[in-house]
Image (cartoon, rainbow, N blue to C red):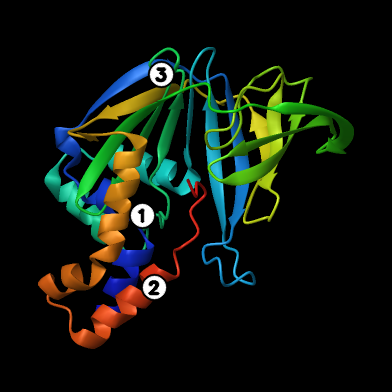
Amino acid sequence: MRYIYIFLLFTISLPCFSQNPFDNQITDIEPVEFIITYSMKYQEDSLNPNFKPQEDMVLFLGKKISKYMSYNFYIGDSMVRKVSSFEEFEKLTTDLKNPLPFVKFQIELFKNYPIGKLTCLDHIIGGSFKYEEEMDLFKWQLKNDTTSIMGYKVQKATCKFGGRNWIAWFCPDLPYNDGPYKFHGLPGLIVKVNDTRFHYLFEMTSIKKPGHELKIDITDRSYIETTKQGFFKAQDAFRNDIISRAKDAGFNSEEQQAMARRMAQKNNPIELK
């Protein structure tokens, strides 16, 4: 059981669900017009090309604003929001028959919120962080190459971002200048995008209108406001201090080393710079 707990703690991020939900307020921003799902395949360990997990991600597209997050995060957050007492919350977080989904990625990205900015919410065990970037992140080069993906005619574009070279395929017939993760700014929805080493691959799997009224919203909690560089430094500090953190938590030497090995395998972030 102890190793199950270690696995949960260091491979599945739980802080977003373990925080007191009654302290949080939800601010509606605007209605969702389309829900776009992407399959994300990624190489977690730069030294292990044979292990590429897959995660479903979702883009909620409004008229002026979008929100991008893990599908499991969205489902789990929706479950937590339905509870109205501490007793219900405790039952939800300990229900083995209907457990909260595993969440590896707690990032929430808002494009054009506030206007002209990209807002990132993310979590490190012990804290929730918030930083903003300018929207003008990508210098796309449009290519003449075209192909068909999911029945849509798409065109090729390339750019450099985060220390990687990227290839995107966008659909002019879907006139939304958005896409997965932080990618945006093309004259059509990004249907597929990958870096040239195929460490990260995003592929659209569906696009649909919501079946009921749905809002792009943001959870108002006590965030640690920082810059992107400050957040990355906090991530590195957590990684580098994993042994002492595990020791302070009461884990023995063998368990501490297991945590350190697992953390060392998470060495290939999407943004290298």
The residue singled out by tag 3 in the image is 113
Which amino acid type is shown beneath numbered disc 2?
A: Arg
Q: Quadrant of residue 144?
A: top right
Look at 64% across and 20% down and name the residue there: 177
Q: Position of residue 56 (x, y in %)?
A: 56, 48
Which amino acid type is shown beneath numbered disc 1?
A: Leu
Label drawn at residue 150:
none
Look at 43% across and 27% down and name the residue there: 110
User: Compared to 49, does 143 lie above or below?
Assistant: above
Cβ atoms under marks 3 and 1 closer than 8 Å = no
User: Compared to 90, does 132 lie above or below?
Assistant: above
Which amino acid type is shown beneath numbered disc 3?
A: Tyr
The residue singled out by tag 2 in the image is 262
Where disc 2 sits, the SS reads: helix
Label whose residue precedes the other's in the sequence (1 or 2): 1
Q: Position of residue 158 (x, y in %)?
A: 72, 35
The residue singled out by tag 1 in the image is 100
Label whose residue precedes the other's in the sequence (3 or 2): 3
User: Is residue 114 rendered to the left or right of residue 268?
Assistant: left
- Give how far apart the Cα atoms at labels 3 and 1 are: 29 Å
Look at 30% across and 62% down and name the residue there: 239
- Eye-nearest disc, 3 or 1: 3
